C-alpha cells in the first residue's frame, strides 16, 4: 500500500469522539508520547527514525509559520514536537501527518506500529472535521491531506534528516532557535 493511501485510511478511521479529547488535542498540537520512567531498549536505527519523525513535525511547523518550536527525543525513542498555534489549519494538518510519513520513509517496518492509529492521525482528523464545519477553502479530505503531507516530506527530506542528525547529537532537545538555525532553507 502506498503511504498516502495508508495515511488517508488512518485519518478516516481516527477517533475524535468526545469534546474533552477535541480540546486537549487542539491545545497540545502535534505532541507525541511522553518519556517512560523505564525506557525499553531500542535500536539506534529505530531511535534515528523517531528523531526523523519529530523533526518532520518541526520542519513543517517552521514552514507553517509556527513560533516557539521545541523538539525532544528520549533514549527510549519517545519524543515530542511542541509549537504555538499555526495560523492556517491546512498547514497544521500537514504538521500532524508528516511525522509518521517521514518515519516510515526511513524505516518501513514502522508502518505496523501505526496501523492501529495514533495521536497524530486523530489530530489531523479533528482539524479536517473543523475545516469542513467552517466550510474553509480549499476543501480538503483525507486523501488530499495525505497527499499534501507526503509531498511535503519528499520536498523537504534533506532538511528533515539533517535536523534529525542535529537532534541526535543535541542531548535530546532542540529549542526554537536551534530549529530555525539548522532547518533553514539551503542557500
Ligand atoms: Zn508525531
Image: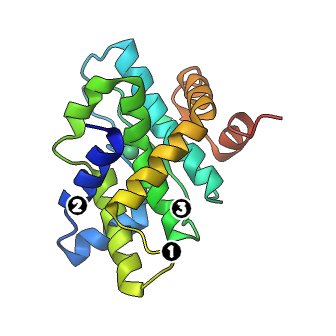
Considering only vertical position in the picture, is 172 above or below 145? above
Q: Quadrant of ligand 1?
A: top left
Alpha carbon distance from label 1 to label 2? 19 Å
Alpha carbon distance from label 3 to label 1? 12 Å
Tell me the quarter of the picture where residue 113 sits.
top left
Q: Position of residue 73 (x, y in %)?
A: 45, 32
Of pointers 1 and 2, the one earlier in the residue sequence: 2
Q: Secondary structure at mark 3?
A: helix
Please give the residue where the numbered disc 1 appears in the rendered image: 138
Of pointers 3 and 2, the one earlier in the residue sequence: 2
Of pointers 3 and 1, the one earlier in the residue sequence: 3
Q: Position of residue 98 (x, y in %)?
A: 45, 45
Considering only vertical position in the picture, is 87 above or below 152? below
Q: For the residues carrying marks 1 and 2, which lies nearer the camera in this image?
A: 1
For the N terminus, the image quarter is: top left
Does residue 98 appear left or right of residue 1 in this picture?
Answer: right
Q: Residue at x 23, y 77 (%)?
A: 19
Q: Is residue 111 visible?
A: yes
Q: Residue at x 58, y 22 (%)?
A: 165
Q: Residue at x 54, y 46 (%)?
A: 152
Q: For the residues carrying marks 3 and 1, which lies nearer the camera in this image?
A: 1
Q: Residue at x 32, y 68 (%)?
A: 126
**Residue occupying the far bottom of the picture:** 134
Does residue 86 appear left or right of residue 96 in this picture?
Answer: right
Please give the residue where the numbered disc 2 appears in the rendered image: 12
Q: Secondary structure at mark 1?
A: loop
Crowd band around label 3 with a 10 angstrom C-alpha radius: few (<14), some (14–19), many (20+): some
Q: Position of residue 42 (x, y in %)?
A: 30, 17
Please give the residue where the numbered disc 3 appears in the rendered image: 91
Q: Nearer the viewer, residue 181 or 91?
A: 91
Mark number displayed over residue 49: none
Amino acid at each position: 500500500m502506498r503511504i498516502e493511501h495508508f495515511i488517508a485510511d488512518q485519518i478516516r478511521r481516527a477517533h475524535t469522539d468526545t469534546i474533552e479529547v477535541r480540546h486537549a488535542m487542539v491545545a497540545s498540537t502535534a505532541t507525541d508520547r511522553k518519556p517512560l520512567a523505564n525506557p525499553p531498549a531500542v535500536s539506534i536505527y529505530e531511535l534515528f527514525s523517531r528523531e526523523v519523525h519529530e523533526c518532520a513535525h518541526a520542519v513543517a511547523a517552521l514552514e507553517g509559520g509556527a513560533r516557539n518550536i521545541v523538539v525532544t527525543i528520549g533514549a527510549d525513542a519517545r519524543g515530542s514536537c511542541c509549537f504555538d498555534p499555526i495560523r492556517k489549519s491546512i498547514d497544521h494538518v500537514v504538521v500532524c501527518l508528516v511525522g509518521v510519513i517521514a518515519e516510515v520513509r526511513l524505516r518501513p517496518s514502522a508502518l505496523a506500529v501505526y496501523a492501529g492509529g495514533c495521536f497524530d492521525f486523530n489530530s489531523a482528523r479533528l482539524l479536517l472535521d473543523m475545516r469542513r464545519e467552517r466550510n474553509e477553502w480549499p476543501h480538503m479530505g483525507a486523501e488530499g491531506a495525505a497527499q499534501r503531507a507526503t509531498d511535503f516530506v519528499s520536498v523537504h527530506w534533506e532538511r528533515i534528516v539533517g535536523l534529525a542528525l542535529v537532534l541526535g547529537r543535541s542531548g535530546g532537545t532542540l529549542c526554537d532557535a536551534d530549529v530555525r538555525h539548522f532547518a533553514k532553507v539551503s542557500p
